[in-house]
């Protein structure tokens, strides 16, 4: 995954978006992160950046850590949060670029998904750039850990042709765009939405095993 470029581009787009948002937009709840509004979602991303640079956390972060990142910025405006994030981004990119472990790609995954979380909350369409890389990062990990006790699944991105094999063989097949696959396997599609995707066969035994993060209770559109 082109971690540095994906993170940098997402951060720059989100900073530009923040400058256009009025107070109503800044306080809009984010359905993909129901505990947070738009400003708080930015606060998490800024906090993660700062804390990774400072060595306070190592990806992936726990819920209590993300909650702290938001709480620590409760008195900051969105403009102040974005300024802090922008100031610390070069140091994060330098650190991430020096690491080879997969976990240091997670901030890019985080920013890419949160950009779409925010866009969905604001009634905007998705940003689908690099979806294939995001899907590959998670599906590649799932493939390595797929239990032989589960039906095997051949996954195909309909727009790119990229394929992944979860287990040996193809008891089931799943086809969707790379964007939908990336969102589904990273906790941005409900189990009902995943089950309603284009499957061959009965996916009930594997639907709950696809999300690498908890699936939302309610359907998400973006």
Image (cartoon, helix red, strand yellow):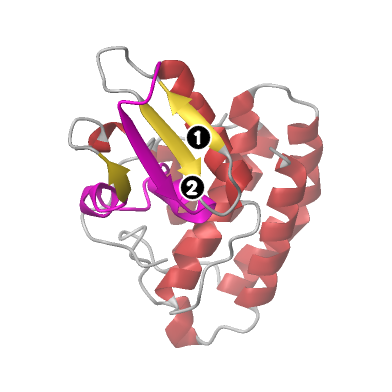
Q: Is residue 188 magenta?
A: yes
Q: Residues within 10 Å of mark 2 (few under 14, many from 20)?
A: many
Expressed as whole percent of the image width and height from the top left, the position of residue 221 reads 36, 67
Q: Residue visible at 39% across and 48% down? A: 184
Q: Residues within 10 Å of mark 1 (few under 14, many from 20)?
A: some
Residue that numbered label 2 is attached to: 182
Q: Earlier in the sequence, mark 1 or mark 2?
A: 1
**Residue in the picture at 19% in, 30% down:** 205
Is 97 drawn above or below residue 191 in the view shown? above
Q: CA distance from mark 1 to mark 2?
A: 8 Å
- Where residue 58 appears, x then y in whole percent? 57, 29
In the rendered image, residue 198, in percent from the top left (x then y), is placed at 33, 50
Residue under the point 51% across and 63% down: 116
Q: Decide if residue 24 is in sight here.
A: yes
Question: Is 208 left or right of 96, judged from the image as shown?
Answer: left
**In what quadrant of the picture does the N terminus appear?**
top right
Disc marking residue 8: none
Q: Is residue 36 left or right of residue 119?
A: left
Going by the picture, which residue comes out furthest to the top? 148
> Residue 51's image quarter?
top right
Secondary structure beneath label 2: helix
Task: Identify which residue, 201 or 148, lies in the foreground.
Answer: 201
Asked if the magenta segment contains residue 210, the reply would be no
- The stretch in magenta equals 168-197
Where is the C terminus found, in terms of image quarters? bottom left
Residue 138 numbered mark, or none? 1
User: What residue appears at the point 26 percent right and 61 percent down from the top-left corner?
Assistant: 219
Q: Is residue 67 among what the camera can see?
A: no
Contact? badges 1 and 2 (CB < 8 Å)? yes
């Amino acid at each position: 995954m082109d971690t540095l470029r994906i993170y940098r581009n997402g951060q720059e787009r989100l900073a530009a978006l923040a400058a256009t948002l009025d107070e109503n937009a800044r306080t809009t709840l984010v359905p993909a992160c129901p505990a947070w509004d738009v400003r708080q979602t930015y606060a998490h991303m800024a906090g993660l950046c700062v804390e990774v640079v400072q060595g306070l956390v190592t990806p992936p972060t726990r819920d209590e850590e993300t909650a702290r990142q938001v709480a620590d910025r409760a008195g900051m405006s969105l403009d102040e949060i974005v300024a802090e994030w922008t100031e610390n981004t070069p140091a994060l990119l330098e650190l991430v670029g020096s690491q080879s472990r997969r976990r240091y790609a997670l901030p890019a995954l985080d920013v890419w998904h949160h950009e779409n979380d925010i866009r969905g909350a604001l009634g905007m369409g998705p940003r689908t750039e690099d979806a294939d890389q995001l899907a590959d990062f998670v599906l590649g990990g799932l493939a390595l850990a797929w239990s032989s006790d589960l039906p095997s699944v051949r996954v195909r991105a309909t727009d790119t042709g990229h394929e992944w094999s979860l287990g040996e063989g193809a008891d089931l097949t799943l086809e969707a765009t790379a964007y939908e696959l990336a969102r589904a396997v990273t906790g941005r599609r409900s189990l009902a939405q995943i089950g309603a995707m284009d499957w061959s066969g009965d996916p009930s035994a594997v639907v709950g095993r696809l999300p690498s993060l908890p699936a939302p209770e309610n359907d998400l559109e973006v």
